[in-house]
Image: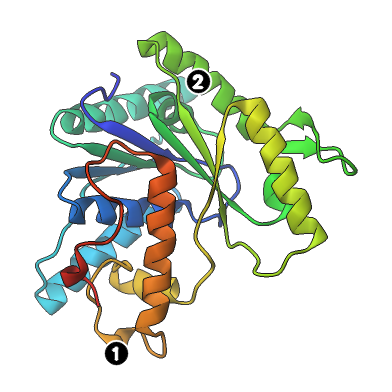
Amino acid sequence: MSGAGAHVIVLGNEKGGSGKSTTAFHLAIFLLYKGYKVATIDVDSRQRTLTKYVNNRLNWCHKMNLDIVQPEHYHLPIARSDSIRENDKEEFELFRNCVVKTEQRADFLIIDTPGFDTHLTRLSHSLADTLITPLNDSLIDLDVMARLDPKTGDPIELGHYSRLVQRARKERMVIDGRTIDWILVRNRLSMLSSRNSRFINSGLEKLALRMGARLANGISDRVIFKSLFPIGMTVFDRVDSDFLGSISAKSQQNVQNEYALLVEALKLPIIGETDFSFANNML
């Protein structure tokens, strides 16, 4: 099981609230509008945020009689055997079946993982071609990646998640001799420079160098996402202004531009420009 027929993008981080599911869904819709076949798998069987986003979209399209792009989506339920070994075996088979179904007919497979270590989290990471780790611009988020020297910002000790990625990279090398392109994405960046912000940036640069990862700026914390989630829409969809309230078209365009820069930084195997030439789908 290697997902060789599709480029596998995994959203991973052991810190909740970093924007994994929102980023996963927006990337899926972006790629769909670009003409690619996209499948998504939600292995976060507790919160199921990505699955809720997909269901909200399906329900809204049915209610409003909309015909717009949808990913091929799979959600993995919790295995409830008393045996951890049996649970792991059941989850592996469910996950394997989803990957096998999609790997030859999808161009991209996007996997959203939970904010804690599970058997499926580790398995998903070992399959990643591109690993995206969203991080809020805070010392708390940085702490789950590594413990830093408070004066120099040098990594003193890797966090649990960083070690998980190290193991996944070794496993991936064994599977097909390839490595994982790991991108640390800074979300909710502060508009104002501060000592903490500079310290975080310096610490992440040093950590990325040590871990063989890359850095990219992500998405600002904007009100528009709170309006879009209940109806399953993204900043790439045409959305009636009644459902965006006071949010301006300019705000939507700003988020689109942020995603354009992010997609460009990810260096995904896509043809053509990463701009939003499909404007007829949007506001």
Which image quarter is the N terminus in? top left
Task: Please name the residue shown 48% across and 27% down the image.
Answer: 122
Q: Quadrant of residue 98?
A: top left
Q: Are marks 1 and 2 in contact (CB under 8 Å)?
A: no
Q: Position of residue 246 (x, y in %)?
A: 41, 90
Give the tally of numbered discs: 2
Q: Is there any visible trace of residue 145 in the rendered image?
A: no
Q: Is residue 162 found left or right of 180 in the rendered image?
A: right
Q: Is residue 234 found left or right of 179 in the rendered image?
A: left
Q: Is residue 112 found left or right of 156 in the rendered image?
A: left
Task: Please name the residue shown 25% across and 38% down the image.
Answer: 108
Position of 113 relative to 262 (above/below): above
| The furthest residue to the right | 151
Task: Please name the residue shown 29% across and 25% down the image.
Answer: 93
Q: Position of residue 137 (x, y in %)?
A: 66, 57
Q: Is residue 74 found left or right of 113 in the rendered image?
A: left
Position of 85 relative to 224 (above/below): above
Q: Position of residue 249 (x, y in %)?
A: 35, 82
Q: CA distance from mark 1 to mark 2?
A: 46 Å
Q: Is there any visible trace of residue 261 in the rendered image?
A: yes
Name the mark on residue 169. Answer: 2
Position of 165 relative to 39 (above/below): above
Name the mark on residue 242. Answer: 1
Neighbor class of circle 2 (other Cα within 10 Å; few <14, some 14-19, many 20+) is many
